[in-house]
Image (cartoon, grey):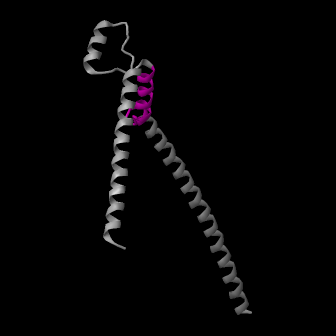
Amino acid sequence: KSSKGKGKMAKHLHDRHAEARVRQVEEARIREEELAHLADNSDNDPAAAVAGAEAGPRLSREERERAERIAARLDTESEELRIRRREERVGLIDRLRKRRLEALAEGMDEGVEEVAEAKREDAKEGDAEVK
């Protein structure tokens, strides 16, 4: 194949990518305009409306509440959450200690039984040798 064909293909791909970028920029601009149009600038406080006009479009009450709920969900460093995590850790540590003690107790019981059984077997063998 000639390099001429590759150049045409590269130009074709370059053109498609350029068109896609232009389309993405246009879609982003349209979304931004729609959000600005949906923003609620008609609160009853005229001073806030003037301040809002200077700061750009404001969010509607529902959008603000939604953003606050999302921020609250993502906020993991509140005092309530720290206390809850600490309590959960203490509960988990207690459960682990109980299970560890139960496992040790079961292991010791099994070990005691094995030792007792081994002693009985040794005693039987010892009695058999004496006879």
Q: Height in image: 61 above or below 14?
A: above
Q: Nearer the viewer, residue 37 or 5?
A: 5
Residue 7 pos. (x, y %): 31, 63
Which of the image's four quarters has the N terminus?
Answer: bottom left
| Majority secondary structure of magenta residues | helix
The quadrant in which residue 31 appears is: top left
Q: Where residue 88 sits in the image (x, y, percent)?
A: 49, 41
Q: Which residues are magenta?
A: 62-82
Q: Is residue 65 located in the magenta-colored stretch of the structure?
A: yes
**Left or right: residue 20 compared with residue 113:** left
Q: How many marks?
A: 0
The x and y percentages for residue 9 are 36, 61
Where is residue 19 drawn, in percent x and y? 36, 46
Give the camera-side residue of 20 and 102. 20
Q: Residue at x 33, y 54 (%)?
A: 14
Is 34 included in the stretch rendered in magenta? no
Q: Is residue 125 above or below residue 27?
A: below
Residue under the point 27% across and 11% down: 50
Q: Residue at x 29, y 16 (%)?
A: 52
Residue 34 lies, with reference to residue 19, above or below; the image says: above
